[in-house]
Image (tube, grey):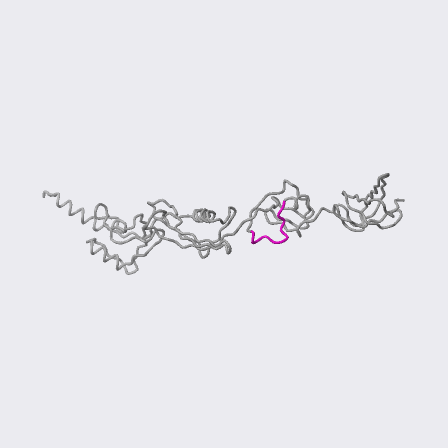
Amino acid sequence: MRSIIITATSLALMGNAALASEVKLRSSIIVEDKYITLSDLFGLPGEKGATPIAYAPAPGQRSTLDAKWLYRVARAHKIRWRPLSLKTKLIVERASQQVFQDDLKTILLAGLRAKGAGDDIELSMNGRTLAIHLPTNVEPTIGLDNLLYNPKSGRFVATVAAPADDPAAKRHRITGRVHPMISIPVVGKRLRRGDIVKKHHITWTSIRESSVRRDTILHEEDLVGMAAKRIVREHAPVRLSYVQRPVLVRKNGLVTIHLASRSMTLTAQGQAMQDGSKGEIVQVKNIQSKKVIEAVVTHAGKVSVSAPTHFKVN
């Protein structure tokens, strides 16, 4: 029976051979650091695996490593690996954390208000939405390096840096416009034709001053008590043409006519010749005398005339 003697050197050689035979290329990787290592590509452990072999893409970006480049790297570092075909590739993506648009607008708004743009303002930024990606090992902060603002046109030009207070941070140029806002009364629920606007229906919303039309209702007292002439959508600006004073007297409807003087008060039945809202003057025909007079609408189904008048109640 043969004896087999295995030395420490033999074990090491066998381990290296096994490691070399087991080396496989990863199909895709996400790296945290600014360098791509052999461990990232082939999963090698230890000091050799930590060897940097290329710069990683910018945070949030990705790149593709082709078969020829990968094979050159493997040969240069004595790694037993070769591509199965020229179509072999590896996709590398750099991990990142994103600075959100709300954070960007917050710092721009603060800078613009400091320059007198007003408190109730909204911003619109030119071009595509700016996506700022930062490495995962830094604070996702933004610094406002420079800001130019034209109050007449509302336009601004800003330079921001991310992360803030970093001389090596990437700078981004942003242009846009400031829009002054105005708060207007709207209804909090949809109203149908004929519905009366009550005080509890009123809520407030902010819209751009530039979008306010001449007939947009701006004051609560001009809306409460009015009747919808059409469907009024909730939380949308209400125009004067959408509402009217409630109709208290209907055309051809019966009304009570009040005639008041210092010495007497008389009433008579009449017929309205037209629709009328409170405070409006309408024509009314006396049921008995058939005479037509002008009267002021006071309440639902009621009108009044003041003495002296040639109207006879009987």
Question: Is residue 233 a member of the stretch shown in magenta?
Answer: no
Residue shown at the point (23%, 58%) measured from the top left: 72
Please name whichever residue, 314 or 218, is drawn nearer the observer in this view of the structure: 218
Quarter of the picture holding the N terminus: top left
Furthest residue in direction left, as rendered: 2
Please name whichever residue, 139 or 4, is drawn nearer the observer in this view of the structure: 139
Q: Position of residue 232 (x, y in %)?
A: 64, 49
Report whether 235 appears left or right of 157.
Answer: right
Quarter-of-image position of residue 214: bottom right
Residue shown at the point (46%, 56%) measured from the top left: 126
Give the magenta part as a residue range.
Answer: 209-219
Please name whichever residue, 272 or 124, is drawn nearer the observer in this view of the structure: 124
Question: Is residue 210 a member of the stretch shown in magenta?
Answer: yes
Quarter-of-image position of residue 314: top right
In terms of secondary structure, what is the magenta stretch mainly? Answer: loop
Report whether 124 appears left or right of 240.
Answer: left
Q: Where is residue 113 in the image (x, y as percent from the top left)?
A: 47, 47
Q: Position of residue 11 (x, y in %)?
A: 15, 44
How many marks can you see?
0
Q: Position of residue 80 (x, y in %)?
A: 21, 54
